[in-house]
Amino acid sequence: MKKIIITIDGYSSCGKSTLAKQLARKLNYTYIDSGAMYRAITLYFIQNNVNWSSHEEVVAALKSIHLDFVINSLTGFGEMYLNEENVEHLIREMVVAEKVSEVAAVKEVREFAVSQQQKMGARKGIVMDGRDIGTVVFPHAELKIFMTADIEIRVQRRFKELFEKNKNITIEEVKKNLELRDYIDANREISPLRKADDAIILDNSHLTHEDQLKLVLQWVEDAIMEHSS
Ligand code: CDP
Ligand code: CDP
């Protein structure tokens, strides 16, 4: 079967990576979590006291950053490595979430990440999720999905995940972070979060994991048919 590029963009915590992983598994595609790259760059900046308002400091710091996705043989999915260190868990912590949208709005950071993402997508059979994948990274992707869900539902979903690891986290803190990130991501000057004109909207507020997969597999089939002729 012909392989395509599938892009999934949307607001924070609406289920993009869950859907991307489901599709990758079912279709035997490679899943790439573009947000993990921005999170790893942010972690590096925090750890090394890089001032991301300074063009010179950002340019110098990016020269010292090497990002890699290394496949975890148990899950079959790539995990984020920053300068040869596995940071998959560290990048999900609140300290990173609090700063990542500011860092991701910096021009040089975006250029650095986007050029690597485009190289990874040189071959087909890719599912990539993020904020600008259908608009900027792969504007010619065969299937583009724009995901959304009610804010209260997204907050509950992310809270549940974070609370399992950190019992001190509060719902208010999670909600504030999601709202702030959505605001910065949608209003930044470079590559703001927006729906690509040819993206299909998926509101999964009331869909189970199974429902959303079933629906999107049909879209994949349609996109493959459309681009085979
Ligand atoms: O999974 P979650 O929705 O929390 O976010 P993520 O996909 O891990 O992305 C973290 C942050 O990285 C986002 O809030 C954006 O600021 C930034 N990002 C971006 O600017 N462009 C992308 N393609 C992916 C993420
Ligand atoms: O990647 P993104 O930040 O958009 O979200 P995610 O990490 O894939 O999903 C956030 C949480 O929502 C996860 O705990 C998923 O299991 C959950 N989820 C859900 O409850 N129902 C769905 N239909 C999709 C995701």
Image: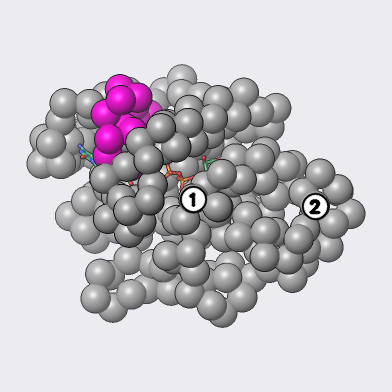
**Viewed as shown, does residue 109 lie left or right of 14?**
right
Residue 123 bears which disc, if any?
none
The type of residue carrying mark 1 is Met
**Label 2 close to label 1 by CB (< 8 Å):** no
Point out residue 90 in the picture as x, y percentages from the top left corner.
48, 64
- Tell which of 126 and 95 is nearer to you: 95
Q: Position of residue 155 (x, y in %)?
A: 33, 33
Residue tagged 1? 94
Label of residue 51 in the image: 2
- Residue 13: within the magenta? no
Q: What is the x, y in percent for residue 160?
A: 26, 45
Q: Is residue 149 magenta?
A: yes
Which element is circle 2 on?
loop
Amino acid type, mark 2: Asn
Q: Which residues are magenta?
A: 139-158
Q: Position of residue 93 (x, y in %)?
A: 47, 56
Residue 138 seen in the current view: no
Q: Is residue 162 above or below residue 14?
A: below
Identity of the residue drawn at 60% across and 29% down: 184
Q: Is residue 51 left or right of residue 227?
A: right
At x 28%, y 78%, the residue is 73
